[in-house]
Image (cartoon, helix red, strand yellow):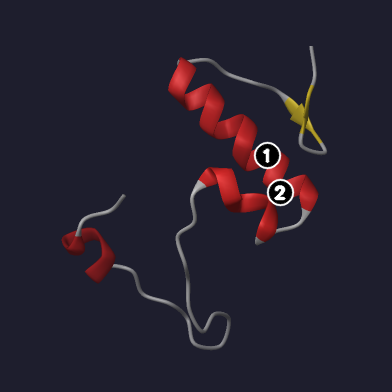
Amino acid sequence: MLDQDWLDQIVLDPAELTGYEFHDVASIAEVTIPRLARRITHGTRARAEGITVYLENGEAVS
């Protein structure tokens, strides 16, 4: 999670965004579309494992 110093540096363009939220990866499927939920889940796992994963439509490709 970002500390307050980082959060204070976030500037939104009011013509494009009215807010932002942080969510646990485990609940991401409840707040975004399936393709993006798959990308976030795979990306989080890849980062934790120190690997690179190639995805198409949010699905891992060998």
Please say if 38 is above or below 33: above
Quarter of the image with the C terminus is top right
Q: Which mark is residue 5?
A: none
User: Count of labels shown?
Assistant: 2
Give the left or right position of residue 61, taking residue 41 as reference.
Answer: right
Q: Secondary structure at mark 2?
A: helix
Report the residue that reaches farthest toward the bottom.
Answer: 15
Report the residue that reaches farthest toward the left.
Answer: 5
Marks 2 and 1, Cα distance to the nearest angstrom? 5 Å
Which residue type does callout 1 highlight? Arg
Between 8 and 34, which is closer to the camera in this rendering? 34
Rendered location of residue 19, percent (x, y): 48, 79
Please say if 43 is above or below 7: above
Q: Secondary structure at mark 1?
A: helix
Q: Which residue is mark 2?
A: 36
Tell me whether the residue at label 2 lies in contact with that at label 1, contact meaning CB atoms closer than 8 angstroms: yes
Give the left or right position of residue 10, taking residue 27 as reference.
Answer: left
Q: Residue at x 54, y 80 (%)?
A: 17
Q: Residue at x 65, y 62 (%)?
A: 31
Looking at the rendering, which quadrant does residue 6 occupy? bottom left
Rendered location of residue 26, percent (x, y): 57, 43
Between 61 and 44, which is closer to the camera in this rendering? 44
Please say if 23 is above or below 46: below
Q: Residues within 10 Å of mark 2 (few under 14, many from 20)?
A: some
Please say if 3 is above or below 50: below
Rendered location of residue 54, percent (x, y): 70, 23
Q: Residue at x 21, y 56 (%)?
A: 3
Which residue type does callout 2 highlight? Leu
Q: Which residue is mark 1?
A: 39
Q: Residues within 10 Å of mark 1 (few under 14, many from 20)?
A: some
Q: Residue at x 80, y 19 (%)?
A: 61
